[in-house]
Every structure is written in C-alpha cells, then in structure tokens.
Amino acid sequence: MERVAVLVMEMQRGVVGDLTKFPDLVAACGRHDVVANAARLLHAARSAGIPVIHCTAAFRPDRSGSHTDNCPFIVALLKDPGHMLEGTAATEVLPELWDGGDLESRRHHGFSPFTGTSLDMTLRSLGVSHVVALGVSLNLGIPGLALEAVNLGYRVTVVRDAVAGIPEEYAQAVLKHTISLLATRAATADLIEEWK
C-alpha cells in the first residue's frame, strides 16, 4: 500500500497571511476558501496518521544561499530588504494550519520545494510514494512542486479547492492544462472521506 504525505506550499504569514505583500493572492485564497479547506484537510490527514510537511521559503539577511539576480520576480521582491527574512514572523506558517507534530522543509532559493532541500530524503525516510499538494501558488510553486515530484517518481494529487493563483482565469487554466498532465486533481471533501 502506498504511503501518502501532505505538502503545504508557502502558506506563510508573509505570503497569504497578515504580513503579506500579495493582496491579490490573499483575495484568490479567500474566493476559494483555501485556508479553511487546507485546515480541514490537514486535520483529517493528522487524524489518519498522514504526515504533514510545510514547504516554506525565507531569505537570510545577507542573502547567502539564495540566487537573487537570476529571476525578475525575485529581483523585484528583494527591493524590500526585509522581505521574508529568516527568523521573522513573515516566514511563519499560518497558525491555523500548524500543528506541533508537523514537519517543515525550508528553502532559501527558487520556487519549488525539492531542489536543494532535504524534502525528497524526508519523504523517502517516511516511506512516502504519493504526495498531496496544497497551498500557493498556481503561478509558480504548485506547478514546480508537481513537476519535481513526478520527476522524482512520486504520484501527485493537487487539492483543487485548497490552491490559488492569480489572475483567476490563469489559475484555472493552469489547473486544467498543466496540473492535469502531472497530477490527479481532487476536492478537499473527497480526500477527507477517503482518509476516514
């Protein structure tokens, strides 16, 4: 029987929480009840003994370990010297999604959670062969997570009502035309029922 883990992508205070600089992304999450759906799903996963791993991002104040000039989006973000600094509240997981038994996989570069982190080894040490992905964003993080996971041999499910991107039309197109090629798409309620 395959072992499942839930990967929560960048559901951090500085990304979609009270310290965000991305109000459009927060609004997209609100339209789809992403945080509420994620909280329900994570509760069900923990109750079923399924590991929850928060894939988070941060920068060191000196930017060591981060490529900072190879991508227009990163260049723009880092015009703010305090953006998502390691050890600040902005890098914390949303409190309603965190549990003391959860794991965290932190990265300091790039947009996807596998390259240059211990995430793959963590999953393999847990015997995981299937990852369930939720969080943000459908613009970069979720497609990157799905593609890397498939390349590493994992089966992937993306929780379609616990992900968001902007603009809405683009996010829906990514789910339909990119994610569908890489992963199964499932609703929160269906996964909760399956894990009972």
Image (spheres, helix red, strand yellow):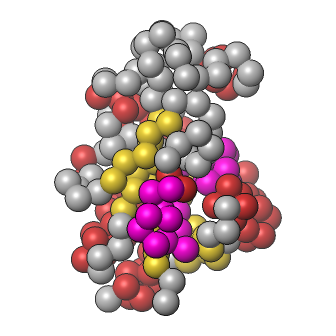
Q: In this view, does 145 lie above or below 130?
A: above
Query: In the displayed structure, would residue 98 be above or below residue 19?
Result: below
Task: Between residue 126 and residue 72, name the one nearer to us.
Answer: 126
Which residue is located at x 68 percent, y 55 percent? 148
143 vs 49, left or right, is right
Total numbered labels placed on residues in the image? 0
Q: Horizontal placement of 131 versus 56: left or right?
A: right
Residue at x 67% of width, y 26% of height: 73
Say above or below: 20 vs 111: above
Whether residue 73 is visible here, answered yes or no, is: yes
Residue 45 percent location from the top left of the image: 34, 73
Could you tell me which residue is drawn at 62 percent across and 73 percent down? 155
Q: Does the magenta stretch include residue 145?
A: yes
Residue 42 point in image, percent of width and height: 33, 66
User: With respect to residue 128, does 80 lie above or below?
Assistant: above
Give x and y (percent) for residue 132: 51, 68
Residue at the left extreme of this rendering: 100
The part of the image, by quadrant, that contains residue 101 is bottom left
Residue range highlighted in magenta: 121-146
Residue 175 in sight: no
Q: Is residue 94 left or right of residue 191?
A: left
114 is within the stretch colored magenta? no
Percent across and percent down for residue 122 are 45, 57
Q: In which quarter of the image is the C terminus?
A: bottom left
Of 109 and 40, nearer the camera is: 109
Residue depicted at x 29% and y 76%: 49
